[in-house]
Amino acid sequence: MWHTLIIKEIKQSFLETSSVVLTLLCLLIIPLALYVSTKDYESRRESYLSERQDYRSRHEKDVGFNVEVHGFRPPAPLSIFCGGVSPLIPDEVVTSRSGLYRSVKETATDSPHALLLGKVDYTYCLIYVVSLAALTFTFGCISMEKESGSLSLVTSNSIPRSVLLLSKVTGRYLAFIVPLLLSVTLGLVIINHSPLISVFSVEMMPTIGVIVCVSLLFVLCLMCLGICVSTWTHYSINSMVVVFLVWTVMILAIPKLSPRIARALYPIDSSTTFRIKRTMLAEDQHDAFVKAREALKEACFAECGAPNEDLLSLPPQTEEGKKAIELYDQRIIPLSQTYQNQKARKLKQLDQDYLNQQKAQNRLALGLARLSPVTCFICTVSELCKTGMHEPDNFNDNAQRFQDQVKKAIYDQYTLREYKGSIMPIYPEGFNRDLIKVPEMSYRYPRLAQSLERVGLDILLLALYMVLFCGVGLIKMNRYDVR
Amino acid sequence: MLKTLIKKEMMETVYDLRFVIASLLFITLIPLSMYVSRIDYEQRLSAYQQESRIWRARHGTPEWDSKGHGFRAPPVLSVFVLGLDPYLPDKVVTDFSGVFQTVKEPNTDGALAVLLGQIDFRFCMVYVVSLMALVFTFNTVSGERERGTLRLLIACSVPRGVLLFCKWLSKTLVLIVPFLVAVCIALLVLIASPQIDLNTPQLVYSIAAILGISLLLIVCMTILGVCISTYATGSLQSITLLLTTWVILVLGIPKVTPMIANIIRRPECRRVVSMRKTALTEDLMAEFYDRREKEIASLYGVGPDEYETRRNGLMIIGKHKLTPEAFQALMNEVKDHKEQLWRQYRHRIPRELEKIEAQYQNQLQATHTLTMVLSRLSCLSCYIYTIADLAGTGIHEPRNYMDNAKRYQDQISQLLYNNIIVHKRRLSWEKGFNPSQMPPLPDMQYARPNLKTIISRRLWDVLLLVFYSVLFYSLAFFRLLKYDVR
C-alpha cells in the first residue's frame, strides 16, 4: 500500500506541468549560477595572485625601519556556493612595529550593476527559486484532492491518514529531487572544468557532499511546510495564497528584519563610532609617549650636563651632548616598549569589549532569525563555504598570526631611535640585513569538522522544523472530516 | 457597461482572500521596512557627523603633512533604496602628491545583515509587490475560462477589448489601494524622524518620482499577470507559468546578466589598477629624487649629502670655496631649481595617473554598456536602475563620488599643497606663504546630480517600462481575440 501510494504520487507529479517547468528551471538556473560564480571566483583569484606577485616583486627585500608588511587574503574556493559575508572581509593586512595590524578593504565598485541588482549563487537559487518551486509543488497536494472530492474516497479505503500524508511527502519529494540533483551534478561538472578548482579532490568533496545533503534536508523541510499548509485549507487557490504569505514571511521578512530588531533591542556603538574611539585612544597614547620621550631627552641632557644648544642641534657638538645621546639611546628602548605594550593592551581591551557586544547582538539576531528555516540553511551553508559569521574572527586570527610572524622576523631584529623628528635604526652586533626575509601570509581556513561543530544546531533545527511541519500537518489531517 | 464590469471585478477581488493577504503584507512590510531603513539612515548620519566633527577638531589645522579628509554624508533617499551606498568609500584622503585615496573602512557591523540580506522599499517592491501583483491577476482570464463563465460573458456581446481592460483596471485599482495606504504610513514614519527634513523641493519631487515609477511597475506587472492568464488553460497552469516568469524576470535576468557581461568583457580588477597607480607614483617620486640629485650635482657641483663648513671666513661645500654672500646666492639658485623641478613632477604625477584611470574607465564603460543592454530585458532592472538613481545610490554614484573626490583634492591643493616644496628629507613652504594664517581645512562639499539630470539619464528605462506594459497588453489582447468560446 505504501509502495502503491508513493508510486502514484510520483507518477502524478511527473505528469503535471509544474514538474516540467520545475525541471527546466532547475536545469537552467542552478548550473548557470554555478558557472557565473565559478568565473567570478576565477577573476578574484587572479587579482589576488596578481596583487600578491606585484607586491612581492617590489617589496620582497624591503626590511627598512619604517616597513609595513602586507599580507593578502585568498578568496575561499567554496565561495562559489555561497558568497556570504565575503564582501565585508578585508582583503589585506598591513602590519606595524607597534604590534597592531591594520586591515584594508578596497572599495568594490568595479561592477556597480552586480552590486545594485545582486549576485546569484547556489545558495541564492535554493533560497529564492527552489524554495518557491518546492512550495508550489506541494501547496495543492491535499487541498486539491479535497476540492475534487478524491480525498474522501481515498480515506474511506481504510488507509491510515499518517500513511497517506507521509506517502505524499515521500512521493513528491522523490519526484522533486530528481531534477534538483541532476542540475547540481551538472553544476559540479561545470565547476570541475575550471583549472583552479578540483571538485572531486579530498579537500572539497566531503564539504560539497555535506552542502548537498543539507540542501536536500532544506528542500524536504519546505515541502513538509507546503503540505502542512495544504492540510489547513479547503481550496487550492487559498492554499496558494497562504503559501505565498508564508513564503514571504519566512524567506523574506524574518531573516531580513531580525538583525534590525536585534539592533533596536540591544543597541551598541556603530563600527564608525568604535573606530573613532579607537583612533582617539591610539592618538592619545602616541601623544603621551611623545611627551614622555621629550621629558626623557631633557632629563638625559640635564644629567650629563650638556648645554641647551645640543638639544636643538643634530648631531650634538659637545662631548657631554654625545654622552647624553648614548644615555638616551639606552633608556628610550624600555620606555618605548612600555608605551607600545600599554597602547596595544588598551586597544586590545577596547577591541575585545566591542567584539563581545557585537557577539551578544548577533546571538540575539540569530536567535530571532532562526524562527525561519531559511536562516538555519544560510548559516549552515555559509559556514561550510568559509564565508559565514565566523569568518571575520578567522580573519583576525590569521592577521594576528601574520603580525606576530613579521614582528619576529623583522621588527624585533632592531630597535629605533627617534630624535628631533628623524628616525634611526639601532642594529645589534653582527646584524646582517640581507639575511632578513619578508614573510608571506599563509591564510588558514577552518577544517570541515570544526565547521560542522559550529553548524550542528542549525542542522538540528532544520530537522526539527521538518518534523514540526509534518506533525502539524498530520494533526490537521487526522481531524479532517470526510463528510 | 464599463462601469458595471469594473464594479463587478472590483467586488470580486475585494472579497477574495488575496486582497486580505496583500493588504496585510503591504501594510506590515512597507512601513516596517521604511522604519528600519530610517533607523539605519539616522545611525549612518550620526556616525558621519561625529567622525567629521572629531576629525576637524583634532586635525583641522593645516600642518606639513596635512591630509585633508573629506567625508560623505549618506543621501536621505537611501531610506528608499540602499543601492550602492554601503559599497562607496567612507572618506577621501588628499595628498600633496596630487593623488587622493578613497578609504573604505572594513565594517563587520552588518555581517548578519549582509548574510541574510537587507530590506528596504526597493526590496519590498521587487520581491513582494511584484509577486502579489502576479498572484492577484494569475487567474483573471484562465480562472473564468476554467469555471466556464468567460464564454457566458462574451456571449453577452461584451467587446473583448473592453472585457480585458475592465479586468486589468479593476485588479490594478484594488491592488494600488493597500499599496498607497502602506506608502502613506511609510511616509509618516519618515516624516516623524527628527533628522530627516523632507521640506526641500528636490526631495519632494524625487519621492514623487519614485512613487510614480513604483505605480508604473505595478501596472506593468498586473498587465503581465493578465497576459499570461490569457495564454493558460487553467489556474494551475497560470500560476506555474507566472511563477516561472517571475523567477526569470526578478531573479534570473537582473542577477545573471552583470556576471555574464563580466565574463564576455572582463575588465581589470580595481585592486590591480590601484596597485599599478601606487607603483607608478613610487617610481615617479624615485625618478624625481634621482633626477634632482643628478642635476644639482652636474649644474652646481653640490652633492646630495654634502653639508657646508666654514673655514677661514669662507664657506666650503663640495668643490666650492665661496664668500658667505656668494654661498647664499648659490644656495638660492639650487633651491629655485629644486622647486621648479618639483612643480613639474607635481603636475606630471596626477596626469600619468589620470591616463591609467581613463584607460580603466574605458574598459569598465564597455562592460557596463553590455550589462545595461542585457539586463534591460527585464522590466524589474529598468525599475531598479531608475529608483536607485533617484535615491542617489545608483550606478552613476561611484563616478560622481570620484568627481567629488577630485574636486576636493584640487581644492586642498590650491589652498595648501601648491605652497609646499619637497626636499629630500623635509618639506618647506613657498615664499610668502604663512600657514598660521590659513583657516582650518574645509570639508568636502558633496554635490549630487539634480532631478532633471537623473530623469534625462533614466528616460530610456521609464520608456522601456511603458513599452513592456504596452507589449504585454497587446499580447493579452490578441490572445483574447483569438479565444474560441466553443
Image (cartoon, rainbow, N blue to C red):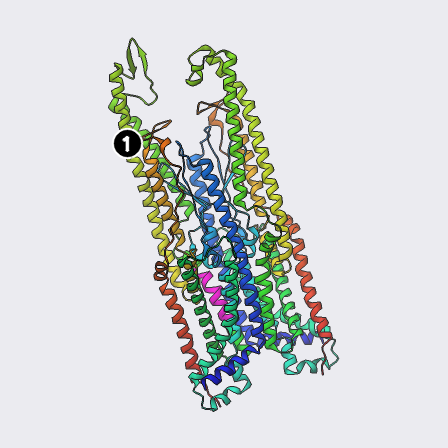
Residue B141 x, y percent position in the rendering: 50, 81
Q: Is residue A181 magenta?
A: no
Nearer to me, A203 or B108 = B108
Q: Is residue B294 above or below residue A12?
A: above
Residue A300 x, y percent position in the rendering: 51, 16
Q: Residue furthest top?
A: B312
Q: Is residue B245 magenta?
A: yes
Question: Mark 1 — on which chain does it sit?
Answer: B
Residue A411 x, y percent position in the rendering: 52, 29
Residue A447 visible: yes
Dot 1: element: helix
| Quarter of the image where one finds residue B279 | top left
* Residue receiving disc 1: B341
Q: Seen in the image, is A472 located left or right of residue B291? A: right
Q: Is residue B113 above or below residue B300?
A: below
Nearer to me, A264 or B191 = B191
| Quarter of the image where one finds residue B282 | top left
Residue range corresponding to the magenta coloring: B243-257
Where does the C terminus of chain A fall, quadrant-wise?
A: bottom right
Q: Which amino acid, mark 1?
A: Leu
